[in-house]
Amino acid sequence: MRISELSRRSGVPITTIKHYLREGLLPPGRPTAATQADYGDSHLRRLRLIRALIGIRGLSISATRDVLSAVSEHEADTHQVLGLVLGARPVTPTDSDESEEAEDRPGVADADALLSEMGWDVSPHAPAKQIVAETLETLRSLGLDYDWRSLLPYAALAQRTATLDLDQLDDAADTVERAERAVLLTLLLEPALLALRRLAQEDESAKRYGG
Amino acid sequence: MRISELSRRSGVPITTIKHYLREGLLPPGRPTAATQADYGDSHLRRLRLIRALIGIRGLSISATRDVLSAVSEHEADTHQVLGLVLGARPVTPTDSDESEEAEDRPGVADADALLSEMGWDVSPHAPAKQIVAETLETLRSLGLDYDWRSLLPYAALAQRTATLDLDQLDDAADTVERAERAVLLTLLLEPALLALRRLAQEDESAKRYGG
């Protein structure tokens, strides 16, 4: 397809596509004339992944280049690719001093206890683990009687949510499309999932306390 | 108790408590001397709710005053109070023109269809409903085959999450303490619930695609 069709099918403006080509995010098309090139479905899928990483995950051009290069390197390993595009695993190996410092947070041992109880196989330096640790620290600092065991029923529901999420990647055409869809569904659904909880709370409150 | 003990038990500095007293957020204590007053457990609970509204929900002093005044007016109605402190229902009646405009969003009809299918009893202008509507619009604009029915299994899990949430309010001493706990647990758990989903996704990905 020509660049105009690539733009139409991806929803990405031609000037933006040219910018991604110049920055090396998108590989060049097959030249068909001095100023024309032909693009295939793999360009379309790659372009959609770029749009997801920049427009939805909010990465910079250079961070996107790093992620895409790591994705290309591990393209046969879907698990690695999903971890890379979602930021669950670092694109470059974490500096060991830095990671030791992170392990020192008081809540991390609690987060580890939770992960171990759930039997979850996750990267030891997953940013999400630090967030669980921080939350447990905050709740404790406010004097709430709350520990990692209190989060277990929520973790069980998160596991069912993740199953729904991953089910939606099954019919993707290839790893790149699967990666794009994982970014979109994970990030775009986040505010909606919290909103559904708020709405369900309101309904549950009406049932328990309503007149 | 004296103000120093109120400060110690609430974790709120004395100067901040004095500021809340001057601003009328916290009712004065019972005077015991020219410069001393006695505070009770109701002051402690009210102070904790103020801290939750300002420090966790991020309300201004004046917005907090409005919420507290509405809470006092409806103190016998736990469902109303929870809606007020969580922002599910407006402190002042919504302007009808504005609400009509909000109803015009294309995703709102879809959000309503979802709420109706779930049988949820929620305020028609709940901010969370707008977020669901926006998400559905965004997913559609990106060309994803996604409608409100796709959110139904997530809504069912949100209902179970909300049951867990509300269960934790049962043993509160009174409506004010219940309101404070609802704010803390709803808002502080939000990043942790999203983080648990990310961790569960990583585990699910390892199970499906891992080597």
Image (spheres, coloured by chain):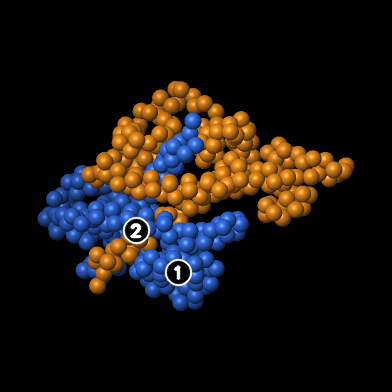
Chain colours: A blue, B orange
Q: Which residue is mark 1?
A: A112
Q: Quadrant of residue B135?
A: top left
Q: Which residue is mark 2?
A: A159
Residue at image location 48% in from the left, 48% down from the top: B167
Q: Position of residue B186 (x, y in %)?
A: 49, 48
Q: Position of residue A83 (x, y in %)?
A: 32, 64
Direction from residue B128 to residue B143 in the image, left or right:
left
Q: Which of the two labelled residues, at mark 1 and mark 2, occupies the earlier sequence position?
A: 1
Q: Secondary structure at mark 1?
A: helix
Parent chain of label 1: A
* Residues marked 1 and 2 touching at CB (< 8 Å): no
In the rendered structure, which amino acid carries the disc numbered 2? Gln
Q: Quadrant of residue A207?
A: top left
**Nearer-the-camera pick, A78 or A10:** A78
Q: Secondary structure at mark 2?
A: helix
In the rendered structure, which amino acid carries the disc numbered 1? Asp
Q: Is residue B199 above or below residue B122?
A: below
Q: Position of residue A36 (x, y in %)?
A: 16, 52
Label 1 packing within 10 angstroms: few (<14), some (14-19), many (20+): some
Parent chain of label 2: A
Residue placed farthest to the left in the image? A32
